[in-house]
Image (tube, rainbow, N blue to C red):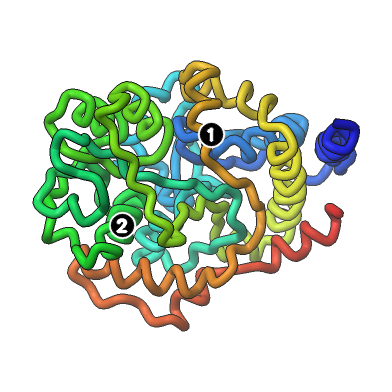
Amino acid sequence: MRGRMGKLISAVAALVVLPTAVWAEPLRVVGNVKVMEIAPLVLASEASGGQVEIALGGVPNLWDLQLASLTVAVAADVSKSAPPSTKLADLAANAETQLLRATVAHPDGRYLLTVTEGLYRVVARRSRGIATEADLKGKRIGTYPGTSAAFYLHKTLQRANLTEKDVTIVTLSPQASEDALIAGSIDAMSMWEPHSERALRTLGDEAVLIAPPHGYSEIYSLHTTQAALDNPQKRAAIVAYVRYLLSACRAISADPSHAQKLIQPLNGYSPDQITQSWHYRFPCEITPNLLDKFVEEEAWLAAQDGRAPRTRAQLARLIDTSVYDEARRAVK
């Protein structure tokens, strides 16, 4: 117990010893505040002493003030607690699929580091004859196309030598997917938390959990633009925030309770729903073999969009590890 408590004290202490007088105006960090993956960013914002603003948005808000339709669909009911951005974002948190989508039009987008890994599952109804991923053939499956949840489904089907053409994809928001599976209007769902966990618990013995060990987890990361990195003052502020973020990940990994309390007013879930659905890792690092993952997902997204996939060299330019390296040297 003393060893664990010592680690927790060290992690929390690291959040308060960093310098605070780093930038002239608050950084604008956007993300979908409905998802629990955002917890380290909120904790880092708290540690910054008011120098970071968390707003509703995503990677598109690095270039566009209007919320992307995807963000609206997955987080429409949180606009009162976390208003949409009123200025372009300095930093944006999103899954890797959204960086790849946005940078087709905006190739100056940059991945900085992976903050959270979301561990996905497919939840299905037992009475529909589903026991394994192979049984998904011909079934109606709720997900949100073009997202990490849809890519998880793609990988699950691939394991059984199936593709999306072998099933009926029903485009639904996270809450609608949960509701539809519980009501029985779809046979299975692939969605992020807490919707999978809540459907699983509500269906009880009727639920089948399909979590094949195919090695895919959502890469929920922090992103910015090359223009921001080329601005010395902005870059210094971003590096300082990432230092807070590295410490936040350590604190959450040691004890997530404080971060869970911070995000509860933002997402509106009960404390029990949050703890029951806490299927995450908080590495705050550069994901190993990240470029290989980008290449695979780019091919999948390009096929859906009817365009040629970008080359490996083009995708490599989206990855900037220099901020992470600089911040890590200051947080031991």
Give the residue pinned by disc 1.
278
Q: Residues within 10 Å of mark 1 (few under 14, many from 20)?
A: some
* Image point (12%, 59%), residue name: 166
Give the residue pinned by disc 2.
156
Give the secondary structure at mark 2. Answer: helix
Q: Is residue 24 visible?
A: no
* Image point (46%, 35%), residue name: 35
Within the image, what quadrant is residue 8 found in?
top right
**Image position of 81 (left or right of 207):** right
* Image point (12%, 31%), residue name: 185
Task: Work out whether 148 lies above or below 12.
Answer: below
Label located before the other in sequence (2 or 1) = 2
Q: Quadrant of the N terminus?
A: top right
Please state the horizontal and vertical placement of residue 238, each as a whole percent of the image: 69, 52
**Cα distance in 3D space between marks 2 and 1:** 21 Å
Please state the horizontal and vertical placement of residue 125, each as a whole percent of the image: 21, 35
